[in-house]
Image (cartoon, rainbow, N blue to C red):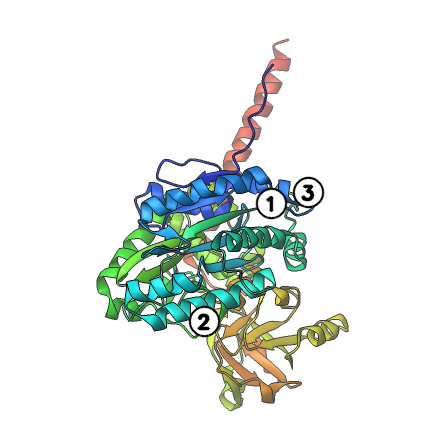
Amino acid sequence: MTTTPEPESIVVLDATTSATRELLGGKAWGIQRMMALGIPVPPAFVVTTDVCRRFHHTPATLPADVWGGVPAAMAALESRTERRFGGGARPLLVSVRSGAAASMPGMMDTVLDLGMTDSVELALAEHTGDPAFAADTRRRFRAQFQKVVGFAPPEDPWEQLRLAISAVLDSWNSRRANSYRESRGLPHTDGTAITVQAMVFGNLDDRSGTGVLFTRNPLSGSAEPYGEWLPRGQGEDVVSGRADALALPVLAATMPQVHADLLAAAERLEADARDVQNIEFTVQSATLWLLQTRAATRSPTATVRHAAVLHRAGLITGTEALDRVRPDHLQALFTPHLDQSAVATATRVATGKPACPGIATGTVVLDAAAAQERVDRGEAVVFARPTTDPEDVAVMSVAAAVITELGGSTSHAAVVCRELGVPCVVGCGSGTFAALAGRTVTVDATSGITYSGELTVLPAPTTDDPDVLLLTSLAREEAMAELNDSLLGLLARRNGKQSE
């Protein structure tokens, strides 16, 4: 009699790990890939998706055997970093991040800088020679821990870790996470993994920062890498949209070697995955660290362009290229455009960064509940916020367009709207929308400009687009192959009957 082995509860990641995405979750699976390719990644261990399923089959309690295995896993991180969790002259701080097998951007919780205490803050200040950095890191930790866990962090770092892991596991069944899965037909039973990873600090000094890189442009589909860079910031600063990031060429100008190393790593990851990658990275004192890689969310136009260009590059087959493109992607490729005669006399009321292309007209609404009520009455709504967060996703999915005052093209609003296919403009400037509430506007999310009133939209002209022609040719070849197979099968069956 054979038995199925129990899934692992904790996995320490290294270059030899080969666990499945379903067990490790997407984030840790990407870390595993990067380590195997020799790309610099801070050491990490994973509390697997199996633990999440167990957690939610009990009264939301972390199983004792799982918690009992955490110290050994943390010891592996301490050994690799030559730091000690919870104290010492070189203290180790960690991040605690969710990561389901299927990407759910922004739907679950994260805690950074965990392990910070009074004594650790003093040790960090002495070790770095920068008390302001240590104080800033502690401020960040306390604010995020309180937001995620619900109360101020205890002084015991191990209790901080236990509470954070439990809170992130709890977020799998949050209202926003459940709504997200339901809207995309994802199962509720898979669970999330928890990645515990050694912190690297983008807020350490003037040669530090954080950023997001797409190996190809996720808006237009062009081949050039696309991303943002925030000096002296941590990853949540960029993703949340609270800070306006800079264009990636700024990193090339200030730290050219780091920029070159980043592009080289990005090229290797795209070739290995055979798809466009969305990469999160941190630079600590001019040293590059990659934190995450995953398939990039992209606009419908970019989906078509990327499928064609990856096929031309020999990274994917014709069948794979066709599998990545839906009819609505092709329809969106030939997007309508504003009547330029109307644009010439229109009043611009906001200008920001294009995050997901498209054109939409609607009433500006600043509050999520009010926006939902208007949509329920059949009105077209432009949802306008300083920044968006996961609680706004339900409204964002039904809005005609989304515009934000803060944030860049890798902020929460931008990433979610690209996945939803909702026109989006971000970073329009603090205080921009107060005077727009209740007004009708037209959002041109291709140019990043919002105009007062309703502007005329003209249909897109037809064109012999080379990418569409390539995909059409591939579809014809596939159809002919299927037809030939069917014909050969029919003839074989007929010949078989005749010989009887």
User: Pointer 1: what residue?
Assistant: 62
Q: The N terminus is located in which quarter?
A: top right
Disc 2 residue type? Gly
Question: Does any portion of residue 284 appear in the rendered image?
Answer: yes
- Mark 2 or 1: in front is 1
Rounded to the nearest angstrom, the CA distance separating label 3 from label 1 is 9 Å
Give the x, y percent position of residue 252. Answer: 26, 67
Q: The C terminus is located in which quarter?
A: top right
Nearer to the camera, 337 or 120: 120
User: Pointer 2: what residue?
Assistant: 408
Q: Residues within 10 Å of mark 2 (few under 14, many from 20)?
A: many
Nearer to the camera, 291 or 340: 291
Rounded to the nearest angstrom, the CA distance separating label 3 from label 2 is 41 Å
Rounded to the nearest angstrom, the CA distance separating label 2 from label 1 is 37 Å
Q: Quadrant of residue 409?
A: bottom left
Q: Residue at x 28, y 53 (%)?
A: 264
Taking the view exactly as shown, the residue that stands out farthest to the right is 377
Give the x, y percent position of residue 152. Answer: 56, 65
Disc 1 residue type? Leu
Q: Residue at x 49, y 51 (%)?
A: 158
Q: Is residue 281 above or below residue 322?
A: below
Tell me the element at label 1. loop
Give the x, y percent position of residue 334. Answer: 51, 65
User: Pointer 3: what residue?
Assistant: 58
Q: Quadrant of residue 204?
A: bottom left
Nearer to the camera, 488 or 385: 385
Disc 3 residue type? Thr
Q: Which of the two discs, 2 and 1, labels the residue nearer the N terminus?
A: 1
Tell me the element at label 2. loop
